[in-house]
Amino acid sequence: MALNTITYVPIRPHIIRKADGTGGYSMTSLNNVMALTNNYYLQNGNGIQFYFAGTTPDYIDNDALYTQYRQTIDDATVAPRDVTNALNQYYVHAFDNTSLGGYAQFPADNVGSTRTIILDENYDDDMGNRLVPHELGHTFNLLHTFESFYGYELVTRGPGANCTTAGDLVCDTPADPYGRYSGADYTCISECPSTYMCSFFDDLRNLYTPSPTNIMSYYYPCVHDFTAGQYDRIQAGLAIRQSHTQYTLDAPETVMTAPSNVVASIVNSAIVITWQDNSSNEMGYFIERSTLPTTGFTPMGGVEPNVTSFTDMSFTNGTRYYYRIRASNTTTGSISTTTMVIAPYCSPYFASDGCPYSINITDVAINGTTLSQNSGCSPSSSNYYTSFTGVSGTVTAGQSSTFTVTKGAWNGMGGSIWVDLDNNGIFETSEQLYQMSVVNTASTFSGSLFIPASITANTVAMRVVVAYLTVPSDPCGGYAYGETEDYILVIKPACIAPAASLVGSTTITAGQMATLTTSLTGGPPFSLTVNSSSGVPTIFTGISASPFSFTVAPSVSTTYTLGQVASGCSTGSVIGSAIVTVNPCTIMYTLKVGNWDDPTVWSCNHVPTQTDLVQVGHAVTIPNSVVARALRVEYRSGGLLTISTSARLRLGL
């Protein structure tokens, strides 16, 4: 079953606190854990997304429930707090069963089935990546991967398999022996990467190879996932719940003004997103991220109400990310605009502030284009690092580009430049394209950076590092004083020398035009010089595509050749010629319907005179006030000459 839409499902949060209103699940964790959970309920950008119903959680201030929530028994105590238009999720401080992390109900047409009871583990990572997605999996009819209620699942797939009638009833989750045998438990997996290391066999003596990363298992891996078959079962479970009559899943989103002024910045090698809070009724915010500007957004984390910043530490170096903010109690009605940032690379560590001693970078230019000017010192809060990803220089593949870096001149400094040519987020040793030979106190250092013709990226990162009394050799190393600045380089394709060819011959009557065509190779735009044996050269510029056609109207027979072809990066080669033979215009005949005084009506491309023999083969009109002249007029098939009232036709010399 291919998912092709997002269904927003409301959750009403209930938080159990002490009788005096203290304790209880924090709003920060509430939002952050649900944001992490939402990640697992999207498959290729579609699926389920949860949002909170209401503007504040339902707080239950009860010492007995806070001290010890009794499984099943206390469900009756909290049942009156259930709402009938959303899922109900209760966050408890402690269970009577200390081994319990939470529990949920499978779909049933009663309000109690909407209830999940979740232990506050005080550990967002496990709650958001395992516990809450797991319990909500049950809410949408997922079974444990080791389920035995329907019988033990066989390892085999295909003929002889029982995966549709036994185990978790999902065939793309491998059979799981957890709990069936002594020792078949969470100790069977390694940490990272999580692999299954125990040897247990099913009833047919086939070796179990369960998935330790599956969310519906009882393992504790470092990564977590659902299978495609589980996503299908979740959607089927959603359809079951949507068919029920004792409750609905249509709690309205909260109407509010969307956050604005969203900004993403690089701070201490992390991405910090800030925004303006324009509402007073949000239950918190989800931070969503994508590598595309308008689609593919998934939640990265959440924050409590009135917080206006979030730090993203989970990214791929050098990747362009787009961020947006959504209140956790909304769906699509109050989403902020997006902001873009390129994830930082690792950066050097500088032990001390070199700013007071002018140990810093002030200007950087590429191919004469200034990328930064009087940039000052990068702050100590960012470890003397600045990412200038809002500006870029242009370089050409297969060519060397010149650069100039201006630096402080009070103390001896060295400088080096790296370019991430393979765009893998790492400045490798082979990507150090420039290194000063010795430390000096000159105010600038300059040189050239060769960009290989084989480069495939459209944009790459460039890093400039300066350091006190040493020439930097490590783009992420440690130095006493200095500064790091990153820039973006836009890569133009490698220059391909153009070539042009002109061939063919044609015959025209004097006064007519001929069309010649040139074939071009290389990178446009082109400029082309055409030589004529009977006149001066003609230059065409701004040619954007091949073939390129142009017209000529020689009065005598003429040979045309190509003088030069050039593109934006090179001149090229030319070949061939075209001959236009011009026959005298002895008899003028009509080419189309029109007026006598229109030169384009006539084969000789001029209005007939008293010396011209004229043949009329179309409907031609002599307009009012026009005096038409010809030596003689003959009519051909289809010919018709209309003389207007005040027009005249004079024949003969």
Image (cartoon, grey):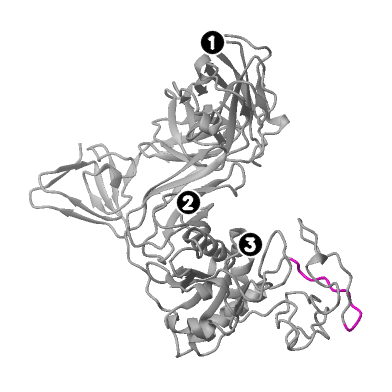
The mark found on residue 126 in the picture is 3
Q: What is the CA distance from the residue labelled 2 to the residue labelled 1?
A: 40 Å
Q: Residue furthest right?
A: 205
Quarter of the image where one finds residue 246: bottom left
Residue 310 position, x and y percent, is 48, 49
Judging by the rendered image, the residue that carries numbered circle 2 is 323
Quarter of the image where one finds residue 80: bottom left
For the point 54% across and 65% down, the residue is 38
Magenta-tinted stretch = 203-212
Q: Main SS type for the magenta part?
A: loop
Residue 561: tell me if it is visible: no
305 with respect to 571 (left or right): left
538 and 43: which is toward the camera: 43
**Mark 3 residue type:** Asp
573 and 12: which is toward the camera: 12
507 with respect to 199 (left or right): left
Q: Going from the N terminus, do you reach mark 1 or mark 3 first? A: 3
Which quarter of the rendering shows the N terminus? Answer: bottom right
468 and 72: which is toward the camera: 72
**Mark 2 residue type:** Tyr
Q: Going from the N terminus, do you reach mark 3 or mark 2 first? A: 3
For the point 51% across and 22% down, the residue is 364
Up-down relation of residue 638 to residue 400 (above or below) = below
For the point 54% across and 48% down, the residue is 312
